[in-house]
Amino acid sequence: MRESSHLTPVPTFAGSGVPLSLARPSQAAPGAPATDARTTDAGARVDRTLLYVARTPDDTLVAHLKSRGWAVLVARTAQEIARLLKPDAVCAGIVDMASFAVRDLAALEASLRRQQVGWIALANAERLADPEVRRLIRHYCFDYVKMPVAHATIDYLVGHAFGMVTLYDADVPVDIAHEGDEMVGTCDAMQQLFRTIRKVANTDAPVFISGESGTGKELTAVAIHERSPRRNASFVAINCGAIPHHLLQSELFGYERGAFTGANQRKVGRVEAANGGTLFLDEIGDLPMESQASLLRFLQEGKIERLGGHESIAVDVRIISATHVDLEDAMRDGRFRADLFHRLCVLRVDEPPLRARGKDIEILAHHILHKFKSDSARKIRGFTPSAIEAMYNYNWPGNVRELINRVRRAIVMAETKLISAEDLDLGNYSAQQTMTLSQAREAAEKRAIEAALLRHRHRLNEAATDLGISRVTLYRLMGAHGLRDAGGDDKALFPGDGDVRE
């Protein structure tokens, strides 16, 4: 969590068939003239509505916001928020955490969870020290400021938040025709991923996608293909770990009639079938050594030979590969060729794990619920607070794939109109579990370190600078949180430093 006076634009949902959109809120300086309305990319007029939630509203702030062109609605209780919020209308929101007693904040959570409101939190130092306030800000707000703060700064922040939710509403159809092809995310890690996809899509260099199982590596590969000059040609995918080793060679390169018993006619392989387009090699780490040599030869020469054939066939194809295996370890163990790795990993894309994506967990859960709610005869309307809390507390070893499976199962098995933590089989992770302040701080610290390492691809100097600590401190905290191997080589990370100490 950071205290800031600005909000970086963040990307909205994107996926195959849907352009990756980056929210581009107003870039006007705080002193620039305000307007009473904005337009979406589609050209539709959008009223600048702002919901100001405070137990004791600041009349001077309200007057300033109105002078800047905002249609300000004031709410003093959760009931008033529910009455003022229209189901399909987007708006900016200000919630003054300092004006409410901590015991009253729980009643606001349902309103803070409304995705069509871009919330900015106001808080003082005392409130920011409270773990419940920090949780609400982290999960539901686009940004926050510590009071006192200039009214112009608040206007600048809500302008950014409003711009984001306006584009979210205008650009993102919830139901997309192709099942499972959406990339959903608003966190910093996904913002970086979307930017990377845009950059690598316009080149023909091989791309290597690294990430844990279930993070959506194939969706990223499809997104790269559909934003590339090859978008009108074929996208051919092959899972190298799902095909028996003795068949993989013929699947990749094809065979001629009579090449072996049962080869009654010529077969075009996956590489040749992707000619002019993109070949996606999933789980490349499971490729046997024989096939690795053949693939390396193709990458060097741009030609293949079908099994049983003697003719070299030129193939123009872009290679995108992916794996959950640590290929650097595989190279050290002799299970993967270093020369092939360097041919495949010209451009690298890192998929963030779900546990490092913050508020995206809830956004994804609602997205999955909306998509598959027809699986149940009961009209499922959402998730209970305990279910939301459990999803944030759970570590998600299966990532997005596991989240999809749990939500789909819960849609069918739920006994009420709201999915509970028990329906998700996450009852042990619900809010009823007690957590000490020390445990909450430790969990938040670990999440912050994980996110910084992911953003900077485990470059310790840059991650430490981002976190505002020294490299030595970061290395020590990584060990304390189990984020590095117990047998890691300190000298490799600290060359010439001698002993690792503060």
Image (cartoon, rainbow, N blue to C red):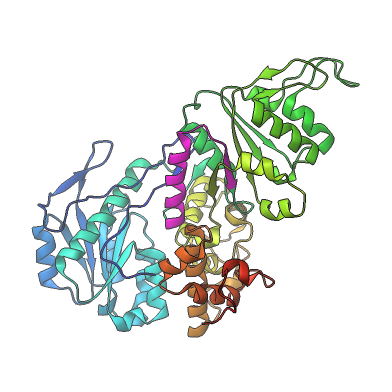
Residue drawn at (50%, 77%) of the image = 473
Is 135 left or right of 299, judged from the image as shown? left
Instruction: Give the magenta-colored segment's residue range.
Output: 188-209
User: Which of 464/73 is in front?
Assistant: 464
Tell me if residue 305 comes above or below residue 494 in the rendering: above
Percent from the top left, x then y, of residue 172?
39, 42
Which quadrant, please, contains the N terminus? bottom left
Percent from the top left, x then y, of residue 370?
48, 48
Tell me if residue 377 comes above or below residue 16 in the rendering: below
Is 203 left or right of 113, judged from the image as shown? right
User: Which of 104/344 is in front?
Assistant: 344
Q: Residue furthest front?
A: 496
Query: Residue 191 lies in magenta, yes or no?
Result: yes
Query: Residue 331 lies in magenta, yes or no?
Result: no
Exactly how many numbered labels are in the figure? 0
Is 93 left or right of 499, judged from the image as shown? left
Percent from the top left, x then y, of residue 391?
54, 64
Is 216 left or right of 140, judged from the image as shown? right
Residue drawn at (70%, 34%) of the image = 296
Q: Quadrant of residue 275?
A: top right
Tell me if residue 287 comes above or below residue 469 in the rendering: above
Residue drawn at (51%, 51%) of the image = 369
User: Which of 199/186 is in front?
Assistant: 199
Tell me if residue 314 comes above or below residue 389 in the rendering: above
Would you say residue 436 is visible in this rendering? no
Q: Residue furthest right?
A: 261
Would you say residue 262 is visible in this rendering? yes
Percent from the top left, x then y, of residue 197?
47, 42
User: Which of 146/200 is in front?
Assistant: 200
Residue drawn at (84%, 34%) of the image = 246
Q: Magenta span: helix, strand or loop, mainly?
A: helix
